[in-house]
Amino acid sequence: MQAKINRYVYLSLLMCLAHLINAQDTARISLLFLGDIMQHETQLNAAYNSKTGKHDYTECFQFLKPYFQSVDLTIGNLELTLAGKPYTGYPQFSAPDELAVTLKQVGVDVLVTANNHSVDRRRKGLERTIRVLDSLKFMHTGTFTDTVERMNDYPLLIHKNGFKLALLNYTYGTNGIPVTRPNVVNPIDTALIRKDLVRAREQQPDAIIVFMHWGNEYESQPTKQQRQLTEFCFTHGAQLVIGAHPHVLQPMEWRKDENQLVVYSLGNFVSGQRPRYRDGGAMLQVALKKIITDTGSVTTIDTANYRLQWVYRTTDSKRSFYVLPVATFENDATNFIKDESSKLAFKTFIDDSRKLLGKYNKRITELAEIPTDTVITYSICLQEARSSEEVYSILVKADSFPHGLDSVQNAEGKTVFYTGKFMRLEKAANYLKRIETEWPQGKVVRFVNGIAVE
């Protein structure tokens, strides 16, 4: 009899446990936040193609796509206008539409537009920026054509992976240029922010994110006002507060027990600024977890990390710009960064950033892993211009033909050959030794997702 009762109790417990398991579900979403997206005169010049008469930013952002594709949403601060010609850099920015087109192509999903450069080209610039972003199907917020548009579209509600996120955006000012009515640029005004946060909570989002344009330029520590505004936002319902404008990195804090996170400044994502501390920034990667039950749901910050990225400007005649994810390039920078001064600047940026964030960050550490869909291979570049028949015959004769042969036209119109791909640097280096008699100028070239990094 007792055995039957115990069995009954055991089965009942199993049924209750099964009900509890079935009564809840878990959803996740990953977010990547970018710092200041800027466009100085040097960047304009580097992106201009005199043959086509257009600007091309493909090279600049080509190494970022795997990072953007590895998350569900990428959100950045567009600190410029898309106001059309004439294109200008500092102090009143107007970037070519091609910049926004390329950002969309590499995977940026959302842009915040309230900053001190929002009205650099007054009303026409603000409104054209909105039209261009709409035409490219960016989600965006912070500036509005008029109050009706703000009333209908603010806070920005983002629906993704079963999550509803509310995004708000504010700026300390617009460089003294008045906002022309009926345009709206969200100002940092606590009465307004409180009202907006009330409205955001009424929408019952899974999380509220506030993107602030604040602080003092080139200072590595937040001001008293930044800290006060952060506490204000947290008190009134925000879970994440993301900062921009100082153009240098500032500390990050994950208050795990309170389910709150603040980044005071992500620094420059891309810009023409070259001085120390300003030539790069960090991308904040956050994962949110939502547990859904029969009675409701609870969303928490599950993980929080940063990824460093540095802006490289070449020293050749073109003076090209590239945004380099540190995780991809730190251990093999010499294959891409040519001059010693740039190699030193790259290392200095990494050391400075890790020293600052390692000392002052709370619970937010560096994510150094390369995204899993980043494919890195190695090949031998056979630089001498020979015919394909000669190359084939020499390699076959040397009994060292490696998986195939590719040829490309270089900038001078000469044919350059690449051997087949190697998955490990050591194997490529060993192969180069086998053929160095025939190709003393041959070199190992690194490929990132099929793009030669040389």
Image (spheres, helix red, strand yellow):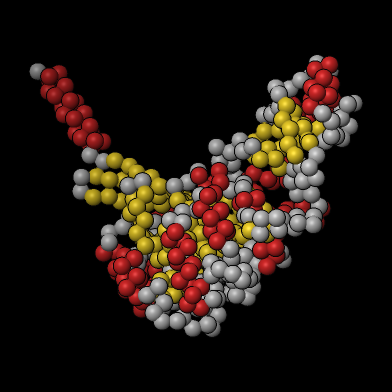
Residue shown at the point (78%, 42%) measured from the top left: 413
Residue shown at the point (34%, 65%) measured from the top left: 153
Q: Is residue 217 left or right of residue 404?
A: left
Which quarter of the rendered picture does the C terminus lie within?
A: top right
The count of marks equals 0
Task: Locate residue 367, reporting x and y percent.
Answer: 56, 47
Q: Report if residue 346 is visible in the image.
A: yes
Task: Locate residue 88, reporting x and y percent.
Answer: 63, 71
Which quarter of the rendered picture does the N terminus lie within?
A: top left
Q: Is residue 131 shown above or below 282?
A: below
Task: Locate residue 309, reporting x and y percent.
Answer: 62, 53
Q: Is residue 273 shown above or below 299?
A: below
Q: Is residue 49 left or right of residue 396?
A: left
Q: Residue 208: which quarter of the image?
A: bottom left
Task: Locate residue 184, reporting x and y percent.
Answer: 41, 76
Q: Residue 144: which quarter of the image?
A: bottom left
Residue shown at the point (42%, 65%) measured from the top left: 141
Q: Is residue 151 shown above or below 288?
A: below
Residue closest to the eye, 322 or 188: 322
Of all residues, the one furthest to the left in this rendering is 1
Q: Is residue 3 shown above or below 64?
A: above
Q: Report if residue 231 is visible in the image.
A: no
Residue shown at the point (61%, 35%) measured from the top left: 375
Q: Is residue 83 left or right of residue 435?
A: left
